[in-house]
Image (tube, rainbow, N blue to C red):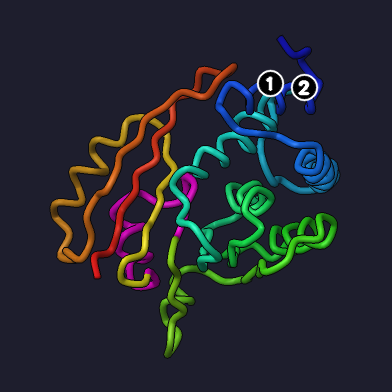
Amino acid sequence: MAKVGDFREILVEVAGEMGIDMPEDRIALFEAYRDTLLLWNSKMNLVSLQSEVDLPVRHILDSLTLLPFLPAGGVRLLDIGSGAGFPAIPLKIFRPDLQMTLLEASRKKCSFLKEVIRKLGLKDITVMHCRLESLLARDVPPAFDMIVSRATFKMKELLVHALPLLKPGGILAAMKGPGLEEEIEALDTMKIKDFRILNDHSFTLPLTGDRRRIVLVDKPR
């Protein structure tokens, strides 16, 4: 068992339990990410870190649970409400081929995200200082192959605002905690019907025992 406080040991051990390969070059990127996040977090409220397992397990490895659901190839991916960079930055470290857009309403958080991207040398990744509603209001809104959202909107609100930005055949991934039954039931009242729930995946994070759900919605062609 990894010693509490050893970021690298915890990251590698729990990744192994989850079947995720963690080579040295990726570990180095995650350590650089950690250092930048901790520095900025001491000056502004980026993310709550109450214990030594929060960053490696509850944020980084939780973000990586989306890996099996990502399409192959250099798809265009939108992360709504990127905040401290979860899940976008961990996913980009593992999938450099993804063309990523990080949507964030806070100017300070956007500055942090740009600094992380610079420090880690990530390519094909853009930070947009913008609200989702403003993106939708454009004359020609952008279209994405995949949209992800980690605990930002309730399901109904997320679908109403995100589906117009999703290409036909695209996938929307909502990363949630337990207890989604009311949110899922509320989808039956939606007037928008050009979507279907592909998968409702429940799992438990190692070490912490936290329960998580990933709901995958597609937009049929």
Residue at the location (57% across, 40% down)?
64
The part of the chain drawn in magenta is 147-166
Q: Is label 2 in a helix, a strand or a loop?
A: helix
User: Quick one: label 2, few (<14), some, or many (20+) residues within 10 Å?
Assistant: some
> Where is residue 77 shown, x and y percent of the image?
51, 63
- Look at the image and tell me in which quarter the N terminus lies: top right
* Residue 159 in the figure: left or right of residue 5: left
On the image, which quarter does residue 183 sit in?
A: top left
Numbered label attached to residue 25: none
Q: Is label 1 in a helix, a strand or a loop?
A: helix
Q: Residue furthest top?
A: 1
On the image, which quarter does residue 171 sit in?
A: bottom left
Q: Amino acid at mark 2?
A: Glu
* Residue 12 in the figure: left or right of residue 67: right
User: Quick one: label 1, few (<14), some, or many (20+) residues within 10 Å?
Assistant: some
Residue at the location (72% across, 22% down)?
10
> Where is residue 52 shown, x and y percent of the image?
73, 23
Assess whether mark 2 and mark 1 are in contact (beta carbons under 8 angstroms).
Answer: yes
Q: Amino acid at mark 1?
A: Glu
Q: CA distance from mark 1 to mark 2?
A: 6 Å
Q: Residue furthest bottom?
A: 139
Query: Does the segment drawn in magenta span residue 153?
Result: yes
> Where is residue 209 shown, x and y percent of the image?
51, 17
* Residue 205 can be seen, yes or no: yes
Numbered label attached to residue 13: 1
Q: Is residue 170 above or below residue 189?
A: below
Pointer 2: what residue?
9
> Where is residue 21 shown, x and y percent of the image?
65, 34
